[in-house]
Image (cartoon, helix red, strand yellow):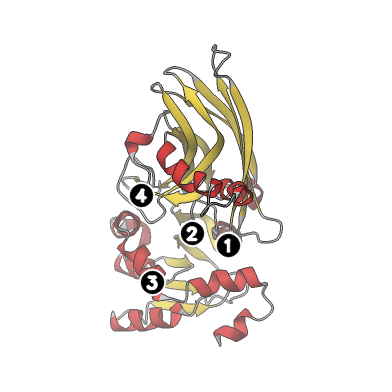
């Protein structure tokens, strides 16, 4: 059945949905305590919002959020997911005695027929690396526009991308400099490729050279798919004398509808999450001093061939009175 549903989709879409067929990726997400506990607290601690409500879980996976909603008193929950993991989700829901409260549908959100014309609350864990890579946000926005009642609620409802500059010379030399001499051969053509591929990894807080800055905030009640392509200026204030080899990005997530607002961060200053941070290595090494600024523009748009991939461009300029250290440039990256 799953294969039939995937017929007619392009290869990139098939690959995306198939990646969620395997239990390993769901195990990683469920074991991410920051992620899962934040959702649990946002839902279960706000029973006054969920009591007797119809809830839609977009991209329900193993149905953990759906079961949280039932625990919070939801009248009924509809979970939608394209991957075959939904068959296991049905078993999980059944062994937990919630089959009468949760309806699970396999298919694309844009194509399934819901048993209710409207829902009171949408819950979804849609975030990808760099917030938007392989993200389901456009699907959540489709569900919002089609199914959410006026003044309905979205969990979570706010996402903010942050950036900062880091010192990471040792790893950059290891990752990028490796291509200068590969068993005696010059592999510099691959060095250029390596520079265009962001690294998803954990960054130690001690490596952060600049103050963090919020670059983009998305309000899920009002944003549109057009907002997911942007060019936004940023300013990074240098907090010490050091080198800047890369710019990192992470995101914070807010559940503002809660009685006590709940937030979690995927930044280097807090507990580990499976999203880690996204590292964009610069072609130039910037030598910075405390009080100086790195000013630039962050550009992002879905790839023309595969909308789940991203084309990212970072333009930057070191603002300094020292003419010997002045630097500017731009780097283009592909997240695929």
Check the image and report above or below for 176 versus 95: above
Q: Earlier in the sequence, mark 3 or mark 4?
A: 3
Q: Earlier in the sequence, mark 3 or mark 1?
A: 3
**Spatial separation of the CA atoms under disc 4 and disc 2:** 19 Å
Q: Earlier in the sequence, mark 4 or mark 1?
A: 1
**Spatial separation of the CA atoms under disc 4 and disc 1:** 23 Å
Residue in the foreground of this view, choosing between 178 and 33? 178
Q: Is residue 249 shown left or right of residue 186?
A: left
Residue position for label 2: 126
Residue 65 sits in which quadrant?
Answer: bottom left
Residue that protrudes farthest toward the top in the picture: 321
User: What kind of element bears circle 3?
Assistant: helix
**Spatial separation of the CA atoms under disc 3 and disc 4:** 31 Å
Q: Which mark, residue 258? A: 4
Residue that protrudes farthest toward the right in the picture: 304
Q: Tell me where residue 283 appears, x and y as whole percent.
A: 57, 36
Q: Earlier in the sequence, mark 4 or mark 2?
A: 2
Q: Tell me where residue 316 appears, x and y as whole percent.
A: 59, 30
Q: Which mark, residue 24? A: 3
Q: Which mark, residue 139? A: 1
Circles 3, 4 touching at the beta carbon (< 8 Å): no
Q: Is residue 168 shown left or right of residue 322?
A: left
User: What kind of element bears circle 1?
Assistant: helix
């Amino acid at each position: 059945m799953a294969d039939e549903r995937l017929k007619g989709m392009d290869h990139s879409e098939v690959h995306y949905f198939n990646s969620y067929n395997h239990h390993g990726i769901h195990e990683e997400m469920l074991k991410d305590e920051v992620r899962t506990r934040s959702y649990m607290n946002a839902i279960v601690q706000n029973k006054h919002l969920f009591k007797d409500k119809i809830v839609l879980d977009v991209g329900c996976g193993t149905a953990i959020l759906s079961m949280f909603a039932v625990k919070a008193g939801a009248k009924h929950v509809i979970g939608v997911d394209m991957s075959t993991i939904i068959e296991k989700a049905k078993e999980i829901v059944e062994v937990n005695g919630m089959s009468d409260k949760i309806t699970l549908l396999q298919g694309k959100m844009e194509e399934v027929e819901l048993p209710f014309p409207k829902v009171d609350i949408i819950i979804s864990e849609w975030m990808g690396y760099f917030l938007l890579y392989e993200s389901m946000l456009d699907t959540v926005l489709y569900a919002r526009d089609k199914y959410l009642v006026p003044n309905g609620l979205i969990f979570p409802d706010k996402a903010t991308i942050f950036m900062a500059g880091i010192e990471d010379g040792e790893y950059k030399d290891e990752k990028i400099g490796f291509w200068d001499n590969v068993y005696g051969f010059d592999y510099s053509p691959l060095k250029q490729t390596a520079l265009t591929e962001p690294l998803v990894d954990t960054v130690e807080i001690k490596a952060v050279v600049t103050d963090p800055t919020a670059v983009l905030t998305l309000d899920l009640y009002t944003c549109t798919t057009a907002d997911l392509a942007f060019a936004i200026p940023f300013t990074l204030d240098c907090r010490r004398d050091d080198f800047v080899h890369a710019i990192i990005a992470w995101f914070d997530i807010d559940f503002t509808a809660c009685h006590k607002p709940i937030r979690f961060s995927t930044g280097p200053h807090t507990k580990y999450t499976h999203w880690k941070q996204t590292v964009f290595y610069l072609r130039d090494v910037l030598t910075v001093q405390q009080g100086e600024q790195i000013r630039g523009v962050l550009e992002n748009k879905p790839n023309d061939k595969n909308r789940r991939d991203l084309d990212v461009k970072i333009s930057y300029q070191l603002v300094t009175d020292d003419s010997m250290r002045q630097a500017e440039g731009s780097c283009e990256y592909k997240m695929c």
